[in-house]
Amino acid sequence: MKKLGLVGGLGPVSTLDYYRLINERYKDIVKPKSVAGDNPEMIIYSLNLGVAYELVSASDWTGLSDYQMSAVEKCVAAGADFCAVAANTAHIVFDEMVKRSSVPLIGMIDETCKYASENGFKKILVFGTKFTMQSGIYENTGKKYGVQCIVPDEASQNIIQNIIFPNLEANIVDPGQKEEILSLSKKLFKDLDVDALVLACTELPLIIKDEDLDIPIIDVASCHIDAIVKQILT
């Protein structure tokens, strides 16, 4: 069994979900016999979202990579066998981090595109932060798996960005914003003729639930967590 180093805090709400879901999925597989249960050992290093946001806003990719790698290195020093970053926008510098890391890193974008390919989705619509949607990381990774990744137009990107920040990052779901993003989802899904909607921000599942839309939804955090638990159990 391997020990996970989880880089969190980007933001804190999704890090809580990662911790809970990793433990739940681990137990679903292991099915502990002890009355005390069973849960995997892990190290969580929580970064400051405000610092990361400023680095991303300034397109300081070297600074972002350095900041996130400092957390990876602390996790490794504490005994982590592999690491993962519990945030989507953080993956803009993922390839650079892989080159620098002394332990394996489990990537969210790869796992999401792999899931889409394995489930027959050929053309997927990506919702995320404006930074993620404009970075090209999904488009470039999707090509490796035969999946075409589509991002919304700039006006739609602005709507999504303003829903994520500041409300969703603070665990606030505004009913008016929920109605707005669901309406936007339906319109773009139809207009762009895609197979699935990707929630490419770990806070988006707070506002878009499976039952809200008659549209196949891919939750990137769920894909990532499945891969993390698999690695823990190897």
Image: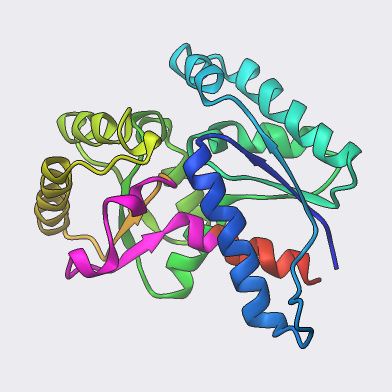
Q: Is residue 205 magenta?
A: yes
In the displayed structure image, the side of residue 207 where residue 180 appears, left or right: left
Residue at 11% x, 59% y: name it: 190
In the displayed structure image, the side of residue 223 where residue 188 appears, left or right: left
Residue at 65% x, 66% y: name it: 23
Q: In the current view of this chain or complex, which residue is farthest to the bottom?
A: 33
Query: In the picture shown, does residue 203 fall above or below 195?
Result: above
In the displayed structure image, the side of residue 133 where residue 193 appears, left or right: left
Nearer-the-camera pick, 159 or 112: 159
On-image quarter of the C terminus: bottom right
Asked where in the image residue 95 lies, by quadrant, the reply is top right
- Residue 55 percent location from the top left of the image: 53, 16
Asked where in the image residue 151 lies, by quadrant, the reply is top left
Nearer-the-camera pick, 207 or 93: 207
Q: Which residues are magenta?
A: 202-223
Residue at 49% x, 20% y: name it: 56
- Residue 142 percent location from the top left of the image: 46, 53
On-image quarter of the N terminus: bottom right
- Residue 140 percent location from the top left of the image: 47, 44
- Asked if residue 149 can be seen in this view, the reply is no
Q: Is residue 79 magenta?
A: no
